[in-house]
Image (cartoon, helix red, strand yellow):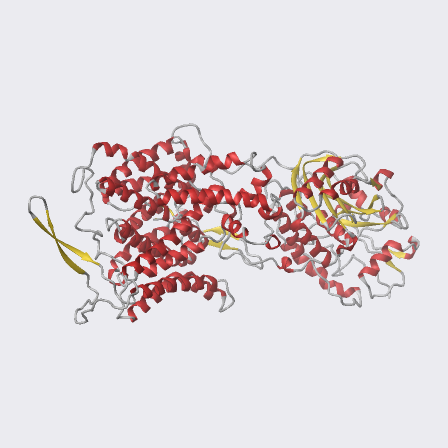
Amino acid sequence: MEAVLNFEGDNDLSYADNDSPLASPVTLSPVGQTGSYDLEQGRQEEEQDEQPAESYSLSIIPRSVDAAWNTNTNATTRGDAQAYVELNELLGNKWQETGRWAGYEESYNPITGAWGPSHVSYLTFKSLIQLRKVMSTGAVLLDVDESGLSGIAERIVNELLDRKEIRPSDREALLKALLQKRSQTEGPSTGTSGIDMIEMVHTFSVTKQRDTADSVEASIVLSGVVDSLQKPVVAFMRLRDAVVMDGILEANMPVRFIFVLVGPSQSGINFHESGRAMATLLADWVFSLEAYLAQNEKELTNAIADFMDCSIVIPPTEIQSLAMLQPIVNFQKRILRERLRPADTRIALGQKAKGPEKPREDPLARTGYPFGGLVKDIKRRYKHYVSDYTDALNPQVLSAVIFIYFAALSPAITFGGLLADKTEHMMGVSELMISTCLQGIIFSLFAAQPVLIIGFTGPLMVFEEAFFEFCKSQGVEYIVGRIWVGMWLIVIVVIVVAVEASFLVRFISRFTQEIFSILISLIFIYETFAKLMKIFKTHPLVLNYEHLNATLDDPFHPVYELHNITDEHGNVTHLHRMRERPYPNTALLSMCLMFGCFFIAYFFRQFKNGIFLPGPIRRMIGDFGVPIAIFFMIAVDISIEDAYTQKLVVPQGLTVSNTSARGWFINPLGEKKHFPIWLMFACFVPALLVFILIFLESQITTLIVSKPERKMMKGSGFHLDLLLIVAMGGASSVFGVPWLSAATVRSVTHVNALTVMTKGPKPEVEKVLEQRISGMLVAALVGISILMEPILKQIPMTALFGIFLYMGITSLSGIQLWDRMLLLIVPKKYHPSDPYATRVQTSRMHLFTVIQVVCLGILWAVKMSKASLALPFVLILTIPMRMLLTGRLFTVLEMKCLDADDAKVVLDEEPGMDVYDESPFP
C-alpha cells in the first residue's frame, strides 16, 4: 500500500477547513513504503535518504504559503515580529548549524550537506523534562544591553560563575567554546534533496518564510559537549533590543533570544534532542510571546510547562497505518483552540506593535499639592461604590463572613482578656469588642480598601502596656492620658495625609518587615509562657493546700484579709485586701488547657492540607480549627469540677470592665483628679509612637492585599484608609476604647476567602470579590457577641493563651529570616534552592542573618526595658541601616537575593507542586 496523504476533498486529515488553527505540512512518502512507521527511524531516513526526487509522491496544498505558518487561533504575535530559530551544535572546534525553524522545522544533514524538507517538530518527552529541569536552575538574564556575541558570551559566563554553576577554572574554557568558529561564516548551505521542486509548487519553506516576512526576530540555540565542565549548565538571555550580529545567522536579522546548553558527555543529557526541544519552544508563537513578556525566571519555566500541557505524547506503540494518526490530529485541533493567549496589550495579531500600554495608576505617587493623594483615593475608589454592594450577592461572601467572624472573634477575646490583665481592667473585652464593632462598620462603609479587617494587634498591646506603666509610675490617669494621645493622633494623621507622606512605605524593605514580624511572634510566645509561669508561682505544686469549703456555691471564692495601717498621728485605717490563695491542680490543669488548645488548633491546621476526607469538608474543618480547639478546652475545663482555673472576665451587657474607675465617657480634664496641662502637650510623643505603629501595620497590610497577583481591579487608597483608621482611633479615645489598625493576618485571610479561582487542572486567581458587606457583617457580629456573656465567662484564660501560642508559632512560617536562622545549624547540603541560599555565599548569608538577629535582640531589649515606648523609633532605624549595608558590606546582587520583595501570593487554595517538578533529573 502506498502511503500517500491527500489534503484535498473531505479527508479528515485535511487542515483546509476554515476553523482549522494549523496549516498542514508537506509530507513526502517514498514509493513502496509500508504503513508501519518508527519515529527515530523516520528521522534518520529523512536525514540520510539520497533517492532522487522522482521517487516521491507529492501532496500539493492549494493554499498560500502563509497558511502553513505554525500557529493557532488563540496564538498571537508581536505585531512587527515573527520567530525564526537556528540550532547550533558544537562539533569539534566549530558550531555547526543543524536545524532551523520558522514555524516548522528543517534539519541539516552534515553527511550529505543538504537540508531536509520542512516538517512538524517531533520531540521526545524526556528532552522536554530535561530541558525544564535544567531551566529551573539555570541562569536567566532578561533585558540585557549587548550588541555582540563576545559581550553576550562574557555576560553568560560571568552569570554562571556568580551562581556557582561553574568553577573559576572553567571560565576561560567555556568562554572559548562559546566563541568558536561558526558554520554560518562559511556561507549558507543550499544543497537540498527535492526541495527545489517542492518550492516550485508553492509548498512551505523555512528560508522562504523567513525572507519574505515583513519583520523577523531570531533566536540562537547553542547546544553541545564541553567535557571540561563538571555538570550541565544552562543560560537563557533576552536582549532588551533585538540587534543584528554579523556572522551569527544565515541571514542578517535582529536577534532577541540566546540559549546555551553545554556540559560533559557523561551527564546523561542528549544535547541534540534538548537543543531541538528549546528551538521548537522558541519557534512556538505563544512561548515566544511569554518569553518576551516574562518578568522573572518563574514565568519562563511556567511558559515551558504551558507548552508541555498543550503537547501530545504518543506512547511507544507501533503505528500500523497512518489512519491511526487521524484522532491525534483532531485532538490537537481542539487543544490549540483552547490554548490560552498571553494577556498583554502590547500584543497585536497581524498589526504593527502599538505603543506602550498606559501604566497602572500608582496609589503611592505624590501629586504635589495638599491632600492630593486623598482626593485621588476618593476619585479612584468611590466610582465603584455601587458595585461594592452588588458584588456581595455571591454565596462565597456568606461563607467568608462565617469564617472570618471566628477568625476575628478569637483575637478580640484573647487580646481583650490580656489587655484587661495589663491595664488593671481599665480596658478589657467589652471595650475592645465594641471598638471593633463600631470602627469596623464605619471603616467598611467609607474605606478605599474595604476588604481590610481592622482590629487590635500585638504591637498596640505592647504600647498600651508600656503607656499604662508609664502613667502609673508618674501618678497620672492612664485612661485620661489616652484622650490627649488620641487628639494628637488626629493632628498627626491630618498633617501626614496633607503632605502625602504615605509614599514613605516604599522604603520599608523585607529587612525591616521580617525583623518586625518575628518580634511580634516572639511577643506572642513570650506572653504565653510568662502567663503560665505566673500561674505556677501563684498556685505552686506543694504537698498541702488550704482547706476548701465545699458547701459554698463557689468553693474557689477569693479570700479577703483585713489589714490595719496606723499613721504617725495614731489614726488607724482598715484595708480589705484580696489574696489569691493557691489551689491544688490549678497549675497543671492550666498547662494542659494551654498546650491542649495549641495542639488541637495546630492539628487542624495540618489536617486542612492532609489527605483525609473530601477536600471541601477537610478545608471547612480546618478553617474552624481555632473555635473547635477553644470549645473543646471549655468542655474539658467544665468537666473537671474540683480544680480551679482563671476564667475570662466579661462584664454583663454594655458595661465597662471596671465600673468603679470609669464610665463610657472620659473627662479630658481628669476623672478622679486634674490632668496636668503640660502633660497634655507632652502626650505628643507617645502619640507619635503609636502613629508609627499604626502606620507600619496598616500600610504594609494594604500593600500585601493589593499586590497585582491578586487581580483586585477596584484599586486601593493608602491615604484615605490611614486617615480613617487613625482618626477613628483618636476620636474613640474619648470613650475609653482601644485604638485599632489593619490586622495583617486577618486581612490576608479575608482576601483569601473572597478569592475566586479558575477551574481546571491548574487553578489560578480569577478575581477577588471586592465588596463592603462581608467586613460590615463580621464587625457587627463581633459587637453582638458581647451579649453572650454567659458563654464567654466559661472560657478559661489559659485556653486563650494556647491560641496566642498558636498565633505566635504559625506566624513564623514563611518568614525568610526565620528560615535563615534555622539554616545556621543546618549543613549546607540540606540548604534550599532559593536564591538567598544558592546565589550568596553561605558565610555571607549567615552574616546577614546575624545582623538581623542582633537588631531583633536590640528591639527586644528595648521592649523589655523602661524605654519600651521608644520601640517604634528604634524599629525605624533599621530602614537607614539596611540602606547603609547595600554597596558597602553587601553587594547589590547579594541584597537582591537576601532582601528582595517576594511578589508571589500564597493562597490557601493554591495548587500543589507542578507534576513536571516531580520527575527526577538524570
**Quadrant placement of the N terminus:** bottom right
Residue 72 is left or right of residue 188, and the answer is left
Number of labelled discs?
A: 0
| Residue 555 spot, x, y in % from top left | 20, 67
Residue at the left extreme? 570
Between 673 and 246, the one nearer to me in the picture: 673
Residue 808: name its quadrant.
Answer: bottom left
Identify the residue shown where x is 52% and y is 47%: 709
Q: In this view, does 723 lie to the left or right of 127?
A: left
Q: Locate the C terminus by quadrant.
A: bottom right
606, 821: nearer the viewer: 821
In this view, the residue farthest toward the top is: 369
| Residue 713, position as x, y percentages in the image | 48, 45
- The residue at the point 61 percent across, 48 percent down is 298
Does any portion of residue 713 appear in the rendered image? no
Closer to the camera, 756 or 573?
573
Task: State which quadrant residue 530 falls in.
Answer: bottom left
Residue drawn at (74%, 61%) of the image? 12
Image height of 656 relative to 674, above or below: below
Q: In this view, does 413 lie above or below 676?
A: below
95 relative position to 760: left or right: right
* Coordinates of residue 903 in the picture (x, y in percent): 53, 46
- Residue 188 visible? The answer is yes
Give how far across and how far down residue 605 sits, in percent.
45, 61
- Horizontal arrangement in the rendering, residue 273 relative to residue 884 (left or right): right
